[in-house]
Amino acid sequence: MRILVLGGTAWLGYTVAKTAVESGHEVTCLARGEGVPAGATFVRADRDDDKALAAVSAEQWDAVIDVARQPFHVRRAVRDLHDVAERYIFVSSVNVYASQEDTGADEDPERLPPLEADRISTLDD
């Protein structure tokens, strides 16, 4: 598969990209940082820029994997990549759940209401 990872230089994005490369997929990472896994292609872009996805929006992708934390980054990715991606996978965080107490919970626990803001300014937003 041709996979575009929005991120890929740190934490979860890096692990997703590395696993995809090791599984034999063609992986491109779009990120502002550096240090994508060996075998992945790197495209530098800052997703705060409205045109950040222009470099990858003309290509076809079997999957786009987005690990963004900012709602406006996700909205832009959906806007800019919906015609070129067969699958768009948004990896949310545990922060959608009302309680952080049970680390072994599945997807069924109570969730927090959707964030109304377009930007998260602090981790407490």
Image (cartoon, rainbow, N blue to C red):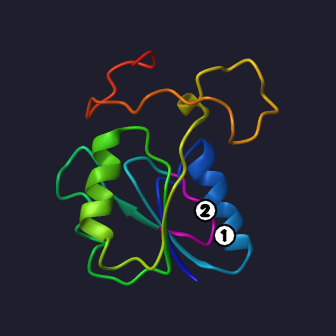
The percent coordinates of residue 103 (x first, y second) are 78, 28
Image height of 61 relative to 103, above or below: below
Residue depicted at x 50% and y 49%: 67
The three-letter code of the residue at mark 2 reads: Ala
Q: Quadrant of residue 113?
A: top left
Residue depicted at x 54% and y 32%: 96
Instruction: Name the residue tied to disc 2.
Output: 17
Residue depicted at x 27% and y 43%: 72
Cβ atoms under marks 2 and 1 closer than 8 Å:
yes
Image height of 54 relative to 49, above or below: below
Q: Is residue 108 magenta?
A: no
Part of the protein shown in magenta: 35-41
The three-letter code of the residue at mark 1 reads: Ala
The percent coordinates of residue 55 (x first, y second) are 27, 70
Residue situated in front as seen by the camera: 101 or 2: 101
Number of residues whose C-alpha sits closer than 10 Å to that of mark 1, classed few (under 14), some (14–19) or many (20 or more): many
